[in-house]
Amino acid sequence: MDQLQSQMHLSGGFTPAKITKCCPDQTDQQCRCVLGWWEGVWQLHSHSAQFEDFQPRGDNMCSLLPSFSLLLICTAGSWAMNVTMPFMEYLDQDRLVCLKWGFDNPAGDITFQLAVNTTGWVGFGLSPNGDMMGADIVLGGLGPKGSYFTDRYSTGNSMPKVDMQQSYTLLSMSENQNQTIMTFQRSIKACDDKDFQITAQPIKLIYAYGNTDDISYHGGRRGTKEVNLLNYMPRTIPTNSSYLNVTMNNITVPSNTTYYHCKVMKLPKLGEKHHIYQIEPVIEHRDIVHHMLLYRCPLYVTNPYDKPCYIGDIGDACFEVVASWGVGGGVYELPENAAIPVGGEDSERLYRFEIHYNNPERKEGIKDSSGLRLHYTAKLRQHDVGIMTTGLLPGNVKYDIPPKANQFHTYAICNTAHFSKLLDPVPDLQVFAVLLHTHLAGRKVRVGHFRNGKQIDFLALNENYNFELQQTVSLGSIKKIKQGDEISVECTYSTANRTSVTQMGLATTDEMCLAFLFYYPAINITSCVSIPDTKGVQMDADIMPQDKIAEYERLLKKAPQTQVILDSNHNVTIYQNGIVRDLMETPSGCQSRNTSNRHCTSWIVNLAEILLLLLSTRVM
């Protein structure tokens, strides 16, 4: 197998002098700061696309050649040390400017912590193109009279103007070992026309800083870096890493509109346990490959095969998701402290690789060898990752959606109190990512988190679901599911343009409602899904008048839920009489302020934590 080379790189020559802690909230083992002598000249334009120069004052020109620099080297495992700000990036190549961030949910607040190797002023901004023009900027520091902080906007290469509506809130400002640490917050949603709209697309972050608290020309102390704040994935390649390919073998895709093909096989034998840290799609026909899933099989599945899925073969029982990809998604990299286990004691197990082909044009004669490239390493991370399927029981279940419905909701639950029947003890589950899934009629997906009968959080929210963009999304904060917590998955559909009933099923024109949760530490439970008992719902969706749709929806919501819990050995436990709890309103984002220092806030969630992400089971 090809060996992947380490991408670890320290820019600039230096001679290590001493170890000191300089990353806030991190121990010496988590973040080492090497104090070294800078060798070479700091070039004025060493960083591309930076805070553009505003007019300098001659008496405040600063030297561009500092005597010492702090190089921040964060070791593996630091990714999730702060559950409220789990993401971190160095914004400069010399590792002098460190940004941490996190958010409660994509419709709420986002919190930043900027740590810069200076005791002067610091600046941070969101820019449409990487320079100052049109940028949304904050400037702050800790001066002789205390902290100062302002929300500003830029109209060009000059001092940024103070925003009349202060949309950012300063949470703390401190100086520690010649470093300024500024923690601040704003609504993800823009509060005024001077605020930059934060989306799930990469954003150009800009920074600058000075040697004193006199905010003036920054010289070469500036830069930019493009980062996806709402769907961040670290890019790290461990040393001594390799990859294995899991692909179809030149199969002929039939001209059906929906086709599932399954390949039950052994993976290359890894005698010791390894960790999969990156999942890369290798797709030959993007126009028809809808999703790909790799499942680990129960021990009683012993015979390989390569043929259509779900025709009664024993491999249909392989439901433990190991890796996945959905249409519109790209490479997915797991956090630096956790990865998916493979090999070791499971080396003799078979795996089922599934591809769902969506071929609405009924194209003929297509040969396909698409698959997944799984990058793995023998250097184990702190946690094993599990992927749990929640939502509506996949397949042909009785939960019909009537035609001509502008908006129709379905509900499913997972009560983790029942996990103890299959597992004892049940650890707290740290959710860090989620993959949400419906088919063509899906418009919204919300996943509620309940404790002691009350909602404490949304595990996931997508108010603008796009069938063509199904990807694993890293959550803005690590969310903790405790034993006894309940999960409620709500999907919203529109069948306004359909003339017949929409059923739950495998076809693209059928529907599903699933949330795949990525979490650690991995446990033996793979699925926690439910369906309503519809025996008491005496209404036919096929012939339903428009004015009865809302009543039909309410009856299905109130119907007792039958909960199905499945473990990796395909042991099934069923519980009846589950209830669907009401979800709170979706956070609206920016709200009006009641002081002269107006700033944006959003619904602030409890620090009860939980996350989700990735595909599972036999569907999608």
Image (cartoon, rainbow, N blue to C red):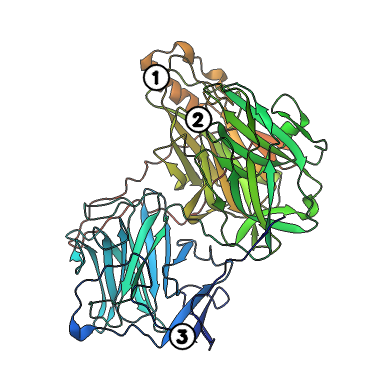
**Three-letter amino acid code at the position of disc 2:** His
How many other residues sit within 10 Å of disc 2, few (<14), some (14-19) or many (≥20)? many
- Mark 3 and mark 1: span between their CA atoms? 67 Å
To which residue does mark 2 refer? 439
Q: Position of residue 567 (x, y in %)?
A: 70, 42
Label 3, on which residue? Answer: 39
User: Callout 1, which amino acid?
Assistant: Asn
Judge left or right: residue 126 versus residue 371. Answer: left
In the image, residue 59 lies at what x, y percent? 19, 86
Q: Residue at x 19, y 58 (%)?
A: 165
| Residue located at (69% from left, 54% from top) | 341
Q: Nearer the viewer, residue 440 or 420?
A: 440
Query: Is residue 157 at all visible to an observer of this figure?
Result: yes
- Tell me the amino acid under the disc marked 3: Glu
In the image, residue 482 sits, relative to residue 575, either above or below, namely: below
- Quadrant housing the N terminus: bottom right
Kindly report which numbered mark, 3 or 1, lies closer to the viewer in this rendering.
Answer: 3
- How far across and how far down the image is residue 255, in percent? 60, 21
Badge 3 element: loop
Q: Position of residue 356 (x, y in %)?
A: 60, 32
Q: Would you say the residues marked 3 and 1 are in contact, meaning their CB atoms lie under 8 Å apart?
A: no
